[in-house]
Amino acid sequence: MGFFSKIKEGLKKTKDSWGKKLFEVFKAKELDDEFYEELEFAMVSADMGVTATDAILEELKDTIFEKRITSPDVARKELKRIMLESIDYEIPEYEYPLVILVAGVNGVGKTTAIGKLAKLFTTAGKSVIVAAADTFRAAASEQLEVWANRAGVRIVKSTEGSDPAAVVFDAISSAKAKGTQVILVDTAGRLHNKKNLMNELEKINRVITRELPDCDRRNYIVLDATTGQNAVQQVDVFNEAIDIDGIILTKLDGTAKGGVVMAISAEQEIPVVYVGVGEQIDDLLPFNATEFIDAIFE
């Protein structure tokens, strides 16, 4: 099943809710104040957030004025274009060796996402090792080991409470010795002690920089699509500790408010790189902005 088929199925709840509201809005006979109010309501209720909604509506109004648009159908095409442009980032191709540091609070599906990410890379013919550097949460490394085994990749772990940076060092050493192409680094998700979290992430980053100075580095945050605007706040916190390069959005199939993609990506100016649309190990997909927007507007 291709991306469009999977994303279309994964967005069924969103389309049934948000897509229908948009359809009703654009049945309007004219682009008056009532039209804009109903459009704003449809966008905010889909969890697009006030900031992203306001920015997109403002651009839509300017476009409609400049192009002298009077047809709701033409306005709909312009909205689709504007929404697409706000989340369609050019993501550089991976180079190897590649280190992906994966952050995120507990409960968002971080461990599962890492296992699925490992599977994506192995399917693409890349060798992978996982560093179980979340040594704070009980049984975190054991859970990650289950997913690593499912994906058929090696894992480096240590005892609970050990130094996360030491785990990363061991994983990098193993990767260098065996010529492994991809290193996936799990990290702790404890937001209640932000200072410790930041210190930990900074130390891990120093180890990676020292041991693999020329590697391709990506810092991804895992967010749960069903948490809506809380996900946006999580990005703010982790961005203080590490420069986030991309978002892995899990449980997109479990929400009727897929507009959260717009809220996170457009408002934070960070690309969504992967989306989770199911429970199976191959249900993490590289994000395609065009097909995402098409699936909603179709």
Image: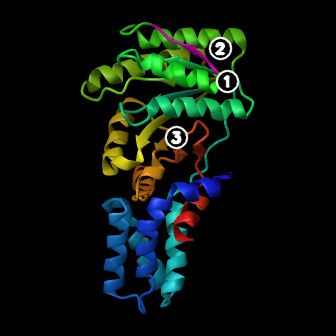
Displayed quadrant of residue 127: top right
The residue that label 1 is drawn on is: 97
- Tell me whether the residue at label 3 lies in contact with that at label 1, contact meaning CB atoms closer than 8 angstroms: no
In the image, what residue type sits under mark 2?
Ala
* Position of residue 256 measured from the top left corner of the image (x, y, whole percent): 40, 59
Q: In this rendering, does residue 107 appear at all?
A: yes
Q: Which residue is drawn at 41% across and 51% down?
A: 264
* Position of residue 162 measured from the top left corner of the image (x, y, whole percent): 39, 7
Image check: 40 left or right of 183? left
Q: Closer to us: mark 3 or mark 1?
A: 3
Query: Which numbered disc, 2 or 1, marks the residue that appears first in the sequence?
Result: 1
The residue that label 3 is drawn on is: 279
- Tell me whether the residue at label 2 lies in contact with that at label 1, contact meaning CB atoms closer than 8 angstroms: yes
Q: How far apart are marks 3 and 1 (CA)?
A: 29 Å
In the image, what residue type sits under mark 1?
Pro
Could you tell me which secondary element the residue under label 2 belongs to? helix
Could you tell me which secondary element the residue under label 3 belongs to? loop
Question: Would you call the spot at circle 2 few (<14 residues within 10 Å), some (14-19), or many (20 or more)?
Answer: many
- Is residue 80 rendered magenta in the image? no
Q: In this rendering, does residue 133 appear at all?
A: no
The residue that label 2 is drawn on is: 175
Along the line of sight, which residue is nearer the eye, 106 or 213? 106
Image check: 46 left or right of 97? left
* Residue span colored magenta: 153-158
